[in-house]
Amino acid sequence: MQEFILHETNKSQFWSVLKEKISTGKRWRIEMSEYRAKRSIPQNSLSHMWYAEISKQLVATGRDYCTPEWVKRNLKKTFLGYREVEDTDLKTGEVETRWELKKTSELDTGDMHYYLQQVEEWCFSMGIELTIPENCEYRELQRRQNA
């Protein structure tokens, strides 16, 4: 069981899954947190539009290496950071620890909005112009925050 979104409507299904897991005799770790929706497709689309705009403006100043992928990687390094990942060698059972950039796909909508705000503020401080479509989810969340 990777992830289970528990609600009043599916608690009997959860109990069935839980009984099945317990019957294996293995020990299980269960972590619970309040459900929050993962970052949205419109948020992801806006971030990629911004990566392209930032890249274009940086390249125009002579920074030819600033591709949209480079911009994305470096903004994630700056504002999201890294997470520790453990990989187990299936043959030896040895656990190897490595660090990888956090993924926006693992953020919830609130965390992604905060990331986008940080990117927008950084761009403003650097004189980089970003497009924020009038009808986009980001603009709507900004309005709600400021209301």
Image (spheres, rainbow, N blue to C red):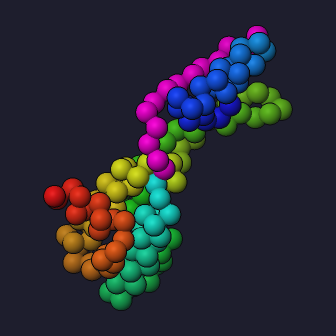
Queried whether the magenta region covers residue 128, the answer comes back as: no
| Residue closest to the eye, 138 or 111 | 138
Q: Is residue 97 visible?
A: no
At x 83%, y 32%, the residue is 91
Q: Quadrant where the N terminus lies?
A: top right
Residue range (magenta): 25-38
Q: Quadrant where the C terminus lies?
A: bottom left
Which residue is the extreme one toward the right? 91
Q: Residue 132, relative to residue 147: is it above or below?
A: below
Q: Residue 73, relative to residue 131: is it above or below?
A: above
- Residue 26, by quadrant, is top right
The percent position of residue 65, horizontal first and vertical second, equals 46, 78
Q: Is residue 94 left or right of residue 109?
A: right
| Residue closest to the eye, 56 or 33 | 33
Q: Is residue 121 visible?
A: yes
Queried whether the magenta region covers residue 36, the answer comes back as: yes
Q: Residue 5, relative to residue 131: is it above or below?
A: above
Q: Is residue 124 left or right of residue 99?
A: left
At x 23%, y 58%, the residue is 144
Q: Main secondary structure of the magenta part?
A: loop
At x 80%, y 33%, the residue is 90
